[in-house]
């Protein structure tokens, strides 16, 4: 199974993109901004990674986990609406919106994230059960500040 994450929208607090499965739109994504791949505060670098379905201590269930991410571990694809719902993982949602966070600040967000994950999960399970390799390619780099 080929999964593609195309990073499209670059905001100070988040990166939003589109997730494709075998070339077809699956859902939208949200990640933390690029902060030099620092654990817990940055998205991961662009590249191609294998996905394995592994038990997650955080969610207490099997989750999709990216393998061999440089200098990182435990990068999962999971539900969540706001950048504060991730520590470097990839969030999925059915829609992109701007929502207030707990401090009353409007943030770039996803909605219907559990439904988006519920639609993605059986596809990942079927590929895994069929012995198919699941590979994700992440593309799209945040623009660099000019004049530096």
Image: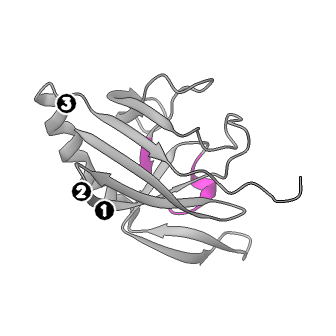
Tell me which colouring the rendered structure shows.
one colour
Give how far across and how far down residue 133 sits, in percent.
23, 28
Give how far across and how far down residue 131 sits, in percent.
14, 24
Residue 30 on the magenta segment: no
Q: How many numbered circles does the render carry?
A: 3
- How far apart, in angstroms, are the residues tagged by discs 3 and 1? 20 Å
What's drawn in magenta, residue-wise? 77-86
SS at mark 1 in the image: helix
130 to 137, vertically: above or below: above
Give how far across and how far down residue 107 sits, in percent.
65, 71
CB-based contact (under 8 Å), mark 2 and mark 1: yes
Residue 51 is drawn in which quadrant?
top left
**Residue at image x 53%, y 43%?**
89
Q: Which mark is residue 119?
A: 2
28 to 96, vertically: above or below: above
Residue at label 1?
115
Rate crowding at label 3 as few (under 14), some (14 to 19) or many (20 or more) other CA atoms within 10 Å. some
**Residue at image x 72%, y 63%?**
12
Give how far across and how far down residue 142 sits, in percent.
65, 54
Rate crowding at label 2 as few (under 14), some (14 to 19) or many (20 or more) other CA atoms within 10 Å. some
Quick one: 23 or 30, which is closer to the camera? 23
In terms of sequence position, does the residue under pointer 3 or pointer 1 come before the other? 1
Disc nearest the viewer among 3 and 1: 3
Q: Which mark is residue 81?
A: none
Quick one: 131 or 20, which is closer to the camera? 20
Residue at label 3?
128
CB-based contact (under 8 Å), mark 3 and mark 2: no
In terms of sequence position, does the residue under pointer 3 or pointer 2 come before the other? 2
């Amino acid at each position: 199974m080929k999964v593609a994450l195309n990073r499209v929208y670059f905001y100070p607090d988040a990166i939003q993109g589109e997730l494709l499965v075998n070339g077809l739109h699956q859902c939208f994504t949200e990640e933390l901004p690029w902060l030099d791949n620092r654990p817990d505060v940055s998205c991961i670098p662009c590249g191609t990674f294998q996905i394995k379905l592994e038990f997650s201590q955080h969610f207490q269930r099997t989750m999709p986990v990216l393998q061999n991410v440089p200098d990182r571990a435990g990068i999962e694809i999971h539900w969540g609406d706001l950048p504060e719902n991730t520590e470097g993982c990839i969030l999925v949602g059915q829609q992109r919106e701007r929502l207030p966070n707990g401090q009353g600040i409007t943030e770039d967000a996803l909605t219907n994230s559990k439904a988006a994950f519920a639609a993605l999960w059986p596809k990942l399970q079927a590929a895994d059960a069929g012995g198919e390799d699941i590979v994700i390619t992440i593309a799209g780099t945040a623009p660099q500040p000019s004049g530096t």
